[in-house]
Amino acid sequence: MSRLAHLRLGVNVDHVATIRNARGGRHPDPVRAAKLAIVAGADGITAHLREDRRHIRDDDIARLMAEIDKPLNFEMAATAEMMAIALKTKPHAACLVPEKRTERTTEGGLDVAGQHNLLAPVVAKLVDAGIRVSLFIAAEPRQIETAARIRAPVIEIHVGAWCDALAEGQTAAAEAEWQRIRAGAQLASKLGLEVHAGHGLNYATAEAIAALPEVVELNIGHFLVGEAVYEGFSQTVKLMRAAMDRGRAKAVS
């Protein structure tokens, strides 16, 4: 048995932009935050350009592409507008997510099975452009199997329900969600999909999920930005990196 390869950390800078946009202007700058995160141990940067531009803006994406020296994961809805932006800017990766104007944050995973005909050509066009595509989905066999059928190379498992259940002390619900995540990661790996995870992770939950051998990348943002109020952004990224490394050390291939 050998230790697994390095678990990648993608730092989401959306909510640095949320703070900036609450008052207007250019401070705090999500691009500066991205650079600090990279120095502190991030392997890539994630940014979600929403239809309503509530946090990340078009110029943020342009500057991230021009100024950071790590991969950019462009979170996007599967719309014609976002497709055009992705195909023009050609980020390293594009993560397709569901999006509703009324939600505070992404509430659940894509219904890949129900939107097969919409998503399949979007995935194909992005892949043909050399962009690594991931689908943000729940750890449900039907969704995972459909993701494989439409030839998405990567899934990102939405782990928010597990994180919420733990935070609320709902032990039985948390255990059920954990078993779903484990089984989903195993199924995806067997189908040849690369497995990522994200949404709601903190130090403890990131350390726990890092021990799943099938998971190769975690994408984390809101918690890091919130903790930065107390510790500073660079320090929170370093602490997250350390938590992930502790969890990864418990996993063997």
Image (cartoon, rainbow, N blue to C red):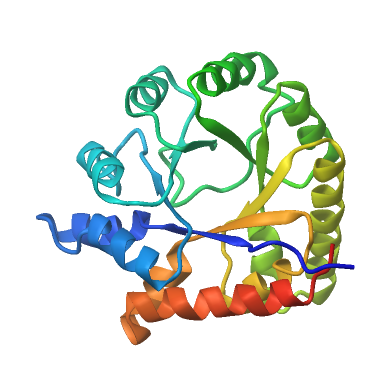
86 over 199 or under it: above or below: above
Front-lying residue, 182 or 163: 182
Image point (60%, 79%), residue name: 243
Q: Residue at x 83, y 58 (%)?
A: 182
Q: Is residue 155 left or right of residue 104?
A: right
Residue 209, x across and y down, in percent: 71, 67
Q: Which quarter of the figure is the C terminus placed in?
A: bottom right
> Which residue sits furthest front?
2
Q: Residue furthest right?
A: 1
Name the residue located 45 percent from the left edge and 62 percent from the top edge: 221
Give the residue at the far bottom of this rendering.
Answer: 230
> Which residue occupies the foreground of this view, 230 or 172?
230
Instruction: Residue 6: give x, y in percent of width and height.
Output: 64, 63
Instruction: Please state which of residues 89 and 82 is positioned toward the viewer in this rendering.
Output: 89
**How far across and down, in percent of the image, does residue 40 sit?**
40, 72
Rendered view: 152 above or below 137: above
How far across and how far down the image is residue 200, in percent? 57, 63
Q: Quadrant of residue 171?
A: bottom right
Q: Please say whether residue 247 is visible from this viewpoint.
A: yes
Q: Is residue 83 left or right of residue 183?
A: left
Q: How many marks?
A: 0
Q: Can the viewer see residue 167? A: no
Quadrant containing the N terminus in the rendered view: bottom right
Which residue is painted at 57% across and 32% down in the image? 133
